[in-house]
């Protein structure tokens, strides 16, 4: 499969089978996270892997968007470990963690798993439920697993703005 095919095939999976994700597949996804580019290769991402049924239930206290996935990655970043642009003080931590999350989603798709990026969560509750240190910003929840046989793709998946609205050449 080409990258273009992979990118187009990947969708936000909102219904998972109950089959557990094997450790070797979790490792493949985490290695994709390590391979993701980050500013000056500082790698400020920190990822909590949740695959224990008790903890997955606890996650439901933090968001209604778990989709009963058998695995969830909590993607965080440490701003103190990230690059800061000298010109204006812009810190790359959230951008880096977003790139990492994208790599994880595409890798999961490539090995037959589904994901959905969840930003609708209570960060205070996530921090409290999973003892996440104060120096970490919680960027995304990534429910992951085998798509259910009857999963459907959102009609919005195929919708996008026109390329001419997105990109311009040499001027705005």
Image: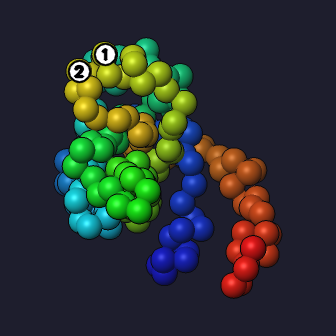
Measuring 27% from the left and 53% from the top, which residue is drawn there?
82
Direction from residue 44 to residue 95 in the image, left or right: right
**What residue occupies the far bottom of the structure in this picture?**
170
How many numbered marks appear?
A: 2
Measuring 24% from the left and 56% from the top, which residue is drawn there?
43
Number of residues whose C-alpha sits closer than 10 Å to that of mark 1, classed few (under 14), some (14–19) or many (20 or more): few
Residue 22 visible in rendering: no
Instruction: For mark 1, give the secondary structure.
Output: helix
Measuring 41% from the left and 62% from the top, which residue is drawn there?
87
Number of residues whose C-alpha sits closer than 10 Å to that of mark 2, classed few (under 14), some (14–19) or many (20 or more): few
Q: Answer whether labels 1 and 2 touch (C-beta < 8 Å).
A: yes
**Residue with the mark numbered 2:** 131
Which residue is more in the foreground, 139 or 113?
139
Where's residue 97, x and y in %? 37, 51
Where's residue 112, x and y in %? 41, 58
Vertically, is 168 above or below 126?
below
**What residue occupies the far front of the structure in this picture?**
87
Which residue is more in the foreground, 144 or 127?
127
Measuring 51% from the left and 36% from the top, which residue is drawn there?
119
Q: CA distance from mark 1 to mark 2?
A: 5 Å
Where's residue 3, x and y in %? 48, 77
Which residue is more in the foreground, 157 or 153?
157
Which quarter of the image is occupied by the C terminus?
bottom right
Q: Which mark is residue 128?
A: 1
């Amino acid at each position: 499969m080409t990258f273009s095919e992979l990118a187009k095939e990947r969708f936000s999976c909102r219904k998972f089978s109950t089959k557990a994700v094997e450790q070797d597949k979790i490792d493949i996804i985490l290695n994709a996270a390590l391979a993701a580019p980050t500013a000056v290769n500082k790698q400020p991402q920190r990822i909590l892997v949740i695959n224990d049924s008790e903890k997955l239930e606890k996650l439901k206290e933090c968001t209604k968007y778990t989709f009963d996935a058998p695995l969830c990655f909590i993607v965080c970043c440490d701003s103190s470990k990230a690059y800061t642009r000298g010109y204006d003080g812009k810190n790359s931590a959230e951008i880096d963690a977003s790139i990492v999350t994208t790599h994880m989603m595409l890798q999961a798709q490539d090995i037959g798993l589904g994901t959905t990026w969840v930003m609708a969560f209570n960060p205070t509750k996530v921090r409290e439920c999973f003892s996440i240190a104060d120096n970490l910003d919680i960027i995304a929840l990534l429910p992951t697993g085998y798509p259910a046989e009857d999963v459907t793709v959102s009609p919005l998946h195929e919708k996008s703005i026109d390329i001419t609205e997105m990109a311009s050449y040499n001027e705005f």
